[in-house]
Image (spheres, helix red, strand yellow):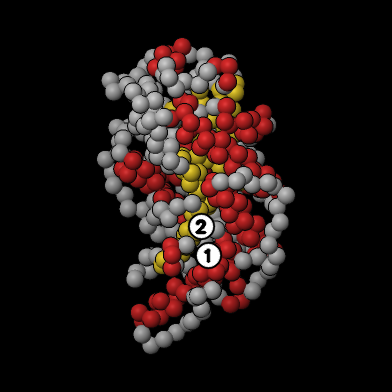
Amino acid sequence: MQRREFLKFSGGLGIAYCLPLPGASAANMPPAAYEKSAYDNLLVMVELKGGNDSLNMAIPYADPLYYRLRPQIAIARDKVLQLDQNLGFHPGMAALMPLWKNKELAVVRGLGYPAPNLSHFRSIEIWDTASNADQFLQDGWLSRTFAAKATPALYSADAVVIGSSDLGPMAGGARTIALANTEQFLNNAKLAQRAYSHGNPSLNHLFKVEADIVRAAEGLRPPVKRAFTTVFPKGTFGNVVKTAAEVVANGEQTGKRVAVLRLTIGNFDTHQNQNAAQAALLTELAEGLAALKSALVELQRWDRSLILTYAEFGRRPAENLSGGTDHGTVSTHLVLGGRVRGGLHGPQVNLGALDGSGNLPFALDFRRLYATVLGQWWGVDASAVLHGKFAPLDLLRA
Protein backbone atom coordinates (compact mmCIF):
# COMPACT_ATOMS: atom_id res chain seq x y z
CA MET A 1 0.00 0.00 0.00
CA GLN A 2 1.50 3.36 -1.06
CA ARG A 3 1.26 6.51 1.03
CA ARG A 4 -1.64 7.96 -0.97
CA GLU A 5 -3.57 4.78 -1.52
CA PHE A 6 -6.81 4.48 0.42
CA LEU A 7 -8.02 2.05 2.99
CA LYS A 8 -11.56 0.73 2.55
CA PHE A 9 -13.55 -0.14 5.61
CA SER A 10 -15.61 -3.33 5.64
CA GLY A 11 -18.81 -2.99 3.67
CA GLY A 12 -17.50 0.03 1.80
CA LEU A 13 -18.99 2.38 4.38
CA GLY A 14 -16.07 4.76 4.41
CA ILE A 15 -12.79 5.55 2.74
CA ALA A 16 -9.97 7.50 4.37
CA TYR A 17 -6.81 8.76 2.75
CA CYS A 18 -3.64 8.81 4.83
CA LEU A 19 -3.69 11.95 6.93
CA PRO A 20 -0.56 13.37 8.58
CA LEU A 21 -0.75 13.13 12.35
CA PRO A 22 0.12 16.33 14.27
CA GLY A 23 2.29 16.39 17.35
CA ALA A 24 0.71 15.77 20.73
CA SER A 25 1.02 19.37 21.88
CA ALA A 26 -0.77 20.72 18.81
CA ALA A 27 -3.46 18.04 19.05
CA ASN A 28 -4.34 19.21 22.56
CA MET A 29 -4.70 22.87 21.62
CA PRO A 30 -8.22 24.28 22.07
CA PRO A 31 -9.99 25.41 18.87
CA ALA A 32 -9.61 29.07 19.81
CA ALA A 33 -5.81 28.74 19.56
CA TYR A 34 -5.83 27.56 15.95
CA GLU A 35 -4.27 29.81 13.39
CA LYS A 36 -6.78 31.28 10.96
CA SER A 37 -6.51 30.06 7.38
CA ALA A 38 -7.85 31.07 3.98
CA TYR A 39 -9.32 27.56 3.94
CA ASP A 40 -11.69 28.60 6.69
CA ASN A 41 -13.61 29.79 3.62
CA LEU A 42 -15.47 26.54 2.92
CA LEU A 43 -16.03 25.27 -0.62
CA VAL A 44 -19.01 22.97 -1.24
CA MET A 45 -19.06 21.32 -4.66
CA VAL A 46 -22.28 19.62 -5.75
CA GLU A 47 -21.90 17.23 -8.68
CA LEU A 48 -25.01 16.81 -10.83
CA LYS A 49 -24.00 13.34 -11.89
CA GLY A 50 -24.80 12.28 -15.43
CA GLY A 51 -25.03 15.73 -16.99
CA ASN A 52 -27.99 17.95 -16.10
CA ASP A 53 -30.23 19.42 -18.79
CA SER A 54 -29.73 23.02 -17.79
CA LEU A 55 -32.09 24.36 -20.48
CA ASN A 56 -34.96 22.88 -18.46
CA MET A 57 -33.41 24.11 -15.21
CA ALA A 58 -32.69 27.73 -16.21
CA ILE A 59 -35.34 28.10 -18.91
CA PRO A 60 -35.22 30.67 -21.76
CA TYR A 61 -39.00 30.85 -21.63
CA ALA A 62 -39.28 34.02 -23.77
CA ASP A 63 -37.49 32.41 -26.74
CA PRO A 64 -39.88 30.69 -29.19
CA LEU A 65 -36.97 28.53 -30.40
CA TYR A 66 -36.94 26.82 -27.00
CA TYR A 67 -40.48 25.54 -27.55
CA ARG A 68 -39.78 24.70 -31.19
CA LEU A 69 -36.77 22.55 -30.24
CA ARG A 70 -38.69 20.87 -27.40
CA PRO A 71 -42.31 20.30 -28.35
CA GLN A 72 -42.74 17.50 -25.78
CA ILE A 73 -40.48 18.37 -22.86
CA ALA A 74 -40.41 22.18 -22.76
CA ILE A 75 -41.64 23.62 -19.47
CA ALA A 76 -44.86 25.59 -20.01
CA ARG A 77 -44.31 29.33 -19.79
CA ASP A 78 -46.98 29.80 -17.12
CA LYS A 79 -45.22 27.29 -14.83
CA VAL A 80 -41.75 28.87 -15.04
CA LEU A 81 -40.47 30.70 -11.94
CA GLN A 82 -39.38 33.96 -13.52
CA LEU A 83 -35.91 35.30 -12.77
CA ASP A 84 -36.15 38.10 -15.33
CA GLN A 85 -38.04 38.80 -18.55
CA ASN A 86 -36.13 36.09 -20.44
CA LEU A 87 -35.06 33.38 -17.99
CA GLY A 88 -36.77 31.36 -15.28
CA PHE A 89 -36.30 28.36 -13.01
CA HIS A 90 -37.96 24.99 -13.32
CA PRO A 91 -41.07 24.96 -11.07
CA GLY A 92 -39.45 22.29 -8.89
CA MET A 93 -36.84 24.83 -7.77
CA ALA A 94 -39.15 27.04 -5.74
CA ALA A 95 -37.05 26.46 -2.60
CA LEU A 96 -34.23 28.52 -4.16
CA MET A 97 -36.32 31.57 -4.97
CA PRO A 98 -35.70 33.25 -1.57
CA LEU A 99 -31.94 33.00 -2.20
CA TRP A 100 -32.44 34.52 -5.66
CA LYS A 101 -34.44 37.41 -4.22
CA ASN A 102 -31.80 37.95 -1.53
CA LYS A 103 -29.11 38.05 -4.25
CA GLU A 104 -27.29 35.08 -2.70
CA LEU A 105 -27.64 32.91 -5.81
CA ALA A 106 -25.80 33.36 -9.10
CA VAL A 107 -26.81 31.60 -12.31
CA VAL A 108 -23.73 31.15 -14.51
CA ARG A 109 -24.55 30.43 -18.15
CA GLY A 110 -22.51 29.15 -21.08
CA LEU A 111 -19.95 27.06 -19.19
CA GLY A 112 -17.90 24.60 -21.23
CA TYR A 113 -14.50 24.15 -22.87
CA PRO A 114 -12.98 23.96 -26.37
CA ALA A 115 -13.37 20.73 -28.37
CA PRO A 116 -15.89 19.21 -25.92
CA ASN A 117 -15.93 15.47 -25.27
CA LEU A 118 -19.35 13.87 -24.86
CA SER A 119 -18.21 10.75 -23.02
CA HIS A 120 -19.35 10.70 -19.37
CA PHE A 121 -16.02 9.26 -18.20
CA ARG A 122 -13.72 11.54 -20.17
CA SER A 123 -15.67 14.76 -19.76
CA ILE A 124 -15.97 14.53 -15.97
CA GLU A 125 -12.26 13.73 -15.91
CA ILE A 126 -11.66 17.01 -17.78
CA TRP A 127 -13.78 18.92 -15.26
CA ASP A 128 -12.16 17.16 -12.29
CA THR A 129 -8.59 17.72 -13.46
CA ALA A 130 -9.21 21.13 -15.10
CA SER A 131 -7.43 19.91 -18.21
CA ASN A 132 -7.69 20.68 -21.89
CA ALA A 133 -9.75 18.22 -23.94
CA ASP A 134 -6.55 16.67 -25.37
CA GLN A 135 -4.61 16.75 -22.10
CA PHE A 136 -4.52 13.89 -19.61
CA LEU A 137 -3.67 14.89 -16.03
CA GLN A 138 -3.39 12.49 -13.11
CA ASP A 139 -4.22 14.85 -10.24
CA GLY A 140 -7.52 16.56 -9.58
CA TRP A 141 -7.46 20.36 -9.58
CA LEU A 142 -8.11 20.48 -5.83
CA SER A 143 -5.29 18.02 -5.13
CA ARG A 144 -2.97 20.39 -7.00
CA THR A 145 -4.41 23.26 -4.98
CA PHE A 146 -3.58 21.62 -1.65
CA ALA A 147 -0.12 20.67 -2.93
CA ALA A 148 0.50 24.33 -3.77
CA LYS A 149 -0.98 25.66 -0.52
CA ALA A 150 -1.51 23.12 2.24
CA THR A 151 -4.46 23.18 4.60
CA PRO A 152 -3.57 23.62 8.28
CA ALA A 153 -2.11 20.47 9.84
CA LEU A 154 -4.88 20.41 12.44
CA TYR A 155 -7.61 20.10 9.84
CA SER A 156 -9.27 16.67 9.93
CA ALA A 157 -8.72 16.43 6.17
CA ASP A 158 -8.52 18.56 3.08
CA ALA A 159 -11.93 17.35 1.95
CA VAL A 160 -14.88 15.12 2.76
CA VAL A 161 -16.77 13.39 -0.06
CA ILE A 162 -20.39 12.46 0.67
CA GLY A 163 -22.71 10.44 -1.54
CA SER A 164 -20.03 8.84 -3.70
CA SER A 165 -16.78 6.90 -3.36
CA ASP A 166 -15.34 8.74 -6.36
CA LEU A 167 -12.82 11.35 -5.20
CA GLY A 168 -13.23 13.49 -8.32
CA PRO A 169 -11.21 16.73 -8.06
CA MET A 170 -9.43 15.41 -4.94
CA ALA A 171 -7.98 12.37 -6.74
CA GLY A 172 -4.25 11.93 -6.78
CA GLY A 173 -3.09 13.32 -3.46
CA ALA A 174 -5.58 15.27 -1.36
CA ARG A 175 -6.21 14.15 2.24
CA THR A 176 -9.77 12.99 1.72
CA ILE A 177 -12.44 11.14 3.66
CA ALA A 178 -15.32 9.57 1.73
CA LEU A 179 -18.26 8.52 3.85
CA ALA A 180 -21.92 7.67 3.77
CA ASN A 181 -22.51 9.46 7.09
CA THR A 182 -20.47 10.49 10.09
CA GLU A 183 -21.82 7.80 12.43
CA GLN A 184 -20.77 5.01 10.07
CA PHE A 185 -17.31 6.49 9.69
CA LEU A 186 -16.86 6.88 13.44
CA ASN A 187 -18.03 3.34 14.13
CA ASN A 188 -15.57 1.95 11.60
CA ALA A 189 -12.78 4.18 12.88
CA LYS A 190 -13.10 2.49 16.29
CA LEU A 191 -11.49 -0.54 14.67
CA ALA A 192 -8.32 1.46 14.13
CA GLN A 193 -5.96 2.16 17.02
CA ARG A 194 -3.01 4.45 17.46
CA ALA A 195 0.35 2.75 17.03
CA TYR A 196 3.64 4.51 16.51
CA SER A 197 6.60 2.26 15.84
CA HIS A 198 7.63 -1.21 14.83
CA GLY A 199 10.75 -2.75 13.43
CA ASN A 200 9.08 -3.57 10.11
CA PRO A 201 8.73 -0.49 7.83
CA SER A 202 5.66 -1.94 6.12
CA LEU A 203 3.96 -2.47 9.46
CA ASN A 204 4.98 1.02 10.51
CA HIS A 205 3.18 2.36 7.47
CA LEU A 206 0.01 0.42 8.24
CA PHE A 207 0.11 1.62 11.84
CA LYS A 208 0.47 5.17 10.55
CA VAL A 209 -2.59 4.70 8.35
CA GLU A 210 -4.55 3.55 11.39
CA ALA A 211 -3.36 6.53 13.38
CA ASP A 212 -4.41 8.85 10.56
CA ILE A 213 -7.90 7.33 10.56
CA VAL A 214 -8.14 7.84 14.32
CA ARG A 215 -7.16 11.48 13.88
CA ALA A 216 -9.75 12.01 11.17
CA ALA A 217 -12.38 10.46 13.43
CA GLU A 218 -11.41 12.79 16.26
CA GLY A 219 -12.16 15.75 14.03
CA LEU A 220 -15.60 14.38 13.18
CA ARG A 221 -16.51 13.40 16.75
CA PRO A 222 -17.72 16.51 18.62
CA PRO A 223 -17.94 16.80 22.41
CA VAL A 224 -21.71 17.31 22.03
CA LYS A 225 -23.65 16.41 18.90
CA ARG A 226 -25.19 19.48 17.27
CA ALA A 227 -28.99 19.66 17.30
CA PHE A 228 -30.13 21.63 14.24
CA THR A 229 -33.35 23.58 14.03
CA THR A 230 -33.05 23.23 10.24
CA VAL A 231 -35.41 20.61 8.85
CA PHE A 232 -33.54 18.49 6.34
CA PRO A 233 -35.47 17.02 3.40
CA LYS A 234 -36.21 13.32 3.24
CA GLY A 235 -34.50 11.26 0.57
CA THR A 236 -31.00 10.51 -0.58
CA PHE A 237 -29.77 14.04 -1.20
CA GLY A 238 -31.44 15.30 1.97
CA ASN A 239 -29.37 12.75 3.91
CA VAL A 240 -26.23 13.85 2.04
CA VAL A 241 -26.89 17.48 2.99
CA LYS A 242 -27.56 16.56 6.60
CA THR A 243 -24.27 14.67 6.77
CA ALA A 244 -22.47 17.65 5.23
CA ALA A 245 -23.97 19.98 7.84
CA GLU A 246 -22.87 17.60 10.61
CA VAL A 247 -19.30 17.59 9.27
CA VAL A 248 -19.22 21.40 9.37
CA ALA A 249 -20.81 21.49 12.83
CA ASN A 250 -18.33 18.96 14.20
CA GLY A 251 -15.41 20.91 12.78
CA GLU A 252 -16.70 24.07 14.42
CA GLN A 253 -16.77 22.33 17.82
CA THR A 254 -13.44 20.54 17.57
CA GLY A 255 -11.62 23.17 15.52
CA LYS A 256 -10.59 20.39 13.11
CA ARG A 257 -12.26 21.63 9.97
CA VAL A 258 -12.12 20.64 6.32
CA ALA A 259 -11.66 22.95 3.35
CA VAL A 260 -13.97 21.19 0.88
CA LEU A 261 -17.18 19.20 0.91
CA ARG A 262 -18.06 17.35 -2.31
CA LEU A 263 -21.69 16.22 -2.56
CA THR A 264 -23.28 14.16 -5.33
CA ILE A 265 -26.82 13.98 -6.65
CA GLY A 266 -28.00 12.08 -9.71
CA ASN A 267 -28.69 10.45 -12.11
CA PHE A 268 -29.25 13.35 -14.53
CA ASP A 269 -28.52 11.24 -17.63
CA THR A 270 -32.07 11.71 -18.93
CA HIS A 271 -32.10 10.16 -22.41
CA GLN A 272 -35.76 9.24 -22.07
CA ASN A 273 -38.85 10.30 -20.14
CA GLN A 274 -36.89 13.26 -18.84
CA ASN A 275 -39.57 15.47 -17.36
CA ALA A 276 -40.58 13.33 -14.38
CA ALA A 277 -37.03 12.26 -13.51
CA GLN A 278 -35.51 15.72 -13.77
CA ALA A 279 -38.37 17.38 -11.91
CA ALA A 280 -37.80 15.07 -8.94
CA LEU A 281 -34.05 15.64 -9.00
CA LEU A 282 -34.29 19.42 -9.31
CA THR A 283 -36.77 19.56 -6.43
CA GLU A 284 -34.43 17.40 -4.34
CA LEU A 285 -31.49 19.62 -5.30
CA ALA A 286 -33.27 22.90 -4.54
CA GLU A 287 -34.69 21.77 -1.21
CA GLY A 288 -31.35 20.27 -0.20
CA LEU A 289 -29.42 23.44 -1.05
CA ALA A 290 -31.97 25.59 0.80
CA ALA A 291 -31.58 23.35 3.87
CA LEU A 292 -27.80 23.52 3.61
CA LYS A 293 -27.98 27.31 3.57
CA SER A 294 -30.20 27.24 6.66
CA ALA A 295 -27.79 24.95 8.51
CA LEU A 296 -24.78 27.07 7.57
CA VAL A 297 -26.58 30.17 8.83
CA GLU A 298 -27.19 28.35 12.12
CA LEU A 299 -23.48 27.59 12.31
CA GLN A 300 -22.58 31.20 11.41
CA ARG A 301 -20.68 29.89 8.40
CA TRP A 302 -22.90 31.14 5.55
CA ASP A 303 -20.73 34.18 4.78
CA ARG A 304 -17.68 31.88 4.69
CA SER A 305 -19.26 29.21 2.48
CA LEU A 306 -19.30 29.00 -1.29
CA ILE A 307 -21.51 26.38 -2.95
CA LEU A 308 -21.24 25.56 -6.63
CA THR A 309 -22.81 22.94 -8.86
CA TYR A 310 -20.98 21.20 -11.70
CA ALA A 311 -21.42 18.28 -14.12
CA GLU A 312 -19.55 16.64 -16.96
CA PHE A 313 -21.66 18.36 -19.63
CA GLY A 314 -25.10 19.70 -20.46
CA ARG A 315 -27.69 18.29 -22.86
CA ARG A 316 -28.56 19.03 -26.49
CA PRO A 317 -31.06 21.86 -27.04
CA ALA A 318 -33.30 19.64 -29.19
CA GLU A 319 -35.24 16.85 -27.52
CA ASN A 320 -34.85 13.30 -28.81
CA LEU A 321 -37.57 10.88 -29.91
CA SER A 322 -37.76 9.28 -26.45
CA GLY A 323 -38.92 12.34 -24.57
CA GLY A 324 -35.43 13.07 -23.31
CA THR A 325 -32.19 14.80 -24.24
CA ASP A 326 -28.84 13.47 -25.38
CA HIS A 327 -25.33 14.50 -24.33
CA GLY A 328 -24.58 18.12 -25.11
CA THR A 329 -21.88 20.68 -24.49
CA VAL A 330 -22.75 23.91 -22.72
CA SER A 331 -24.24 23.95 -19.22
CA THR A 332 -25.59 26.44 -16.70
CA HIS A 333 -24.56 26.12 -13.07
CA LEU A 334 -25.48 27.62 -9.72
CA VAL A 335 -23.24 29.44 -7.24
CA LEU A 336 -24.60 30.20 -3.76
CA GLY A 337 -23.26 31.86 -0.62
CA GLY A 338 -23.46 34.80 1.73
CA ARG A 339 -20.81 36.67 -0.26
CA VAL A 340 -22.04 35.66 -3.72
CA ARG A 341 -22.92 38.43 -6.14
CA GLY A 342 -26.34 37.11 -7.02
CA GLY A 343 -27.89 37.43 -10.46
CA LEU A 344 -27.26 36.26 -14.00
CA HIS A 345 -23.68 35.78 -15.19
CA GLY A 346 -22.59 34.89 -18.70
CA PRO A 347 -24.38 35.74 -21.94
CA GLN A 348 -27.99 34.88 -22.66
CA VAL A 349 -28.35 31.52 -24.41
CA ASN A 350 -28.66 31.94 -28.19
CA LEU A 351 -30.62 28.96 -29.51
CA GLY A 352 -30.28 30.32 -33.04
CA ALA A 353 -26.52 29.77 -33.00
CA LEU A 354 -26.23 25.97 -32.74
CA ASP A 355 -23.24 24.26 -34.30
CA GLY A 356 -23.32 21.52 -36.94
CA SER A 357 -24.01 18.90 -34.27
CA GLY A 358 -26.96 20.81 -32.85
CA ASN A 359 -25.06 21.95 -29.76
CA LEU A 360 -24.43 25.36 -28.27
CA PRO A 361 -20.91 26.82 -28.42
CA PHE A 362 -19.47 27.58 -25.00
CA ALA A 363 -19.14 31.17 -23.83
CA LEU A 364 -17.23 30.78 -20.53
CA ASP A 365 -14.41 28.32 -19.92
CA PHE A 366 -15.33 26.35 -16.78
CA ARG A 367 -11.82 26.96 -15.46
CA ARG A 368 -12.77 30.59 -14.94
CA LEU A 369 -15.11 29.32 -12.22
CA TYR A 370 -12.21 27.47 -10.61
CA ALA A 371 -9.97 30.53 -10.95
CA THR A 372 -12.58 32.48 -8.97
CA VAL A 373 -12.45 29.92 -6.17
CA LEU A 374 -8.66 29.77 -6.15
CA GLY A 375 -7.75 33.42 -6.41
CA GLN A 376 -10.64 35.28 -4.81
CA TRP A 377 -11.95 32.73 -2.29
CA TRP A 378 -8.68 31.17 -1.11
CA GLY A 379 -5.88 33.44 -2.32
CA VAL A 380 -4.11 30.67 -4.24
CA ASP A 381 -2.14 31.26 -7.45
CA ALA A 382 -4.77 30.06 -9.94
CA SER A 383 -2.47 30.05 -12.97
CA ALA A 384 -0.07 27.62 -11.30
CA VAL A 385 -2.86 25.19 -10.34
CA LEU A 386 -4.74 25.46 -13.65
CA HIS A 387 -1.61 25.47 -15.86
CA GLY A 388 -2.71 28.66 -17.56
CA LYS A 389 -4.35 32.04 -17.07
CA PHE A 390 -8.12 32.08 -16.70
CA ALA A 391 -9.83 35.31 -15.71
CA PRO A 392 -11.96 34.98 -12.57
CA LEU A 393 -15.68 35.68 -12.81
CA ASP A 394 -17.28 38.59 -10.97
CA LEU A 395 -19.11 36.32 -8.55
CA LEU A 396 -17.96 37.41 -5.09
CA ARG A 397 -18.44 40.44 -2.91
CA ALA A 398 -15.60 41.60 -0.72
Labels 2 and 1 touching (C-beta < 8 A): yes
Residue at screen point 62% across, 33% down: 96
Give me the disc on residue 180. Answer: 2
Residue 16 horizontal/vertical position (percent)? 46, 64
Relative to 258, 67 lies left or right: left
Estimate the x, y position of residue 228 in percent, counting from the top left: 70, 52
Residue projecting furthest to the top: 64
Amino acid type, residue under disc 1 in the picture = Phe
Instruction: Give the quadrant of residue 26.
Output: bottom right
Q: What residue sits 30% from the left and 36% below the top?
A: 117
Q: CA distance from mark 2 to mark 1?
A: 8 Å
Rate crowding at label 2 as few (under 14), some (14 to 19) or many (20 or more) other CA atoms within 10 Å. some
| Residue drawn where x is 44% and y is 73% of the image | 209
Secondary structure under the numbered disc 1 in the rendered image: helix
Callout 2 amino acid: Ala
- Residue at 57% in and 27% down: 91
- Sequence-wise, the earlier of marks 2 and 1 is 2
**Residue 224 falls in image quadrant:** bottom right
Per the image, the residue denoted by label 1 is 185
**In the drawing, what numbered circle is on residue 217?**
none
Judging depth in this view, the residue of 120 and 282 nearest the camera is 282
Examine the rendered structure and indicate whether residue 363 appears above or below residue 158.
Answer: above
What is the quadrant of the N terminus in the image?
bottom left
Q: Nearer the viewer, residue 166 or 176?
A: 166
The x and y percentages for residue 282 are 53, 35
Q: Quadrant of residue 257?
A: bottom right
Please state the horizontal and vertical placement of residue 395, each as a whole percent of the image: 56, 34
204 is higher (above) or lower (below) than 151:
below
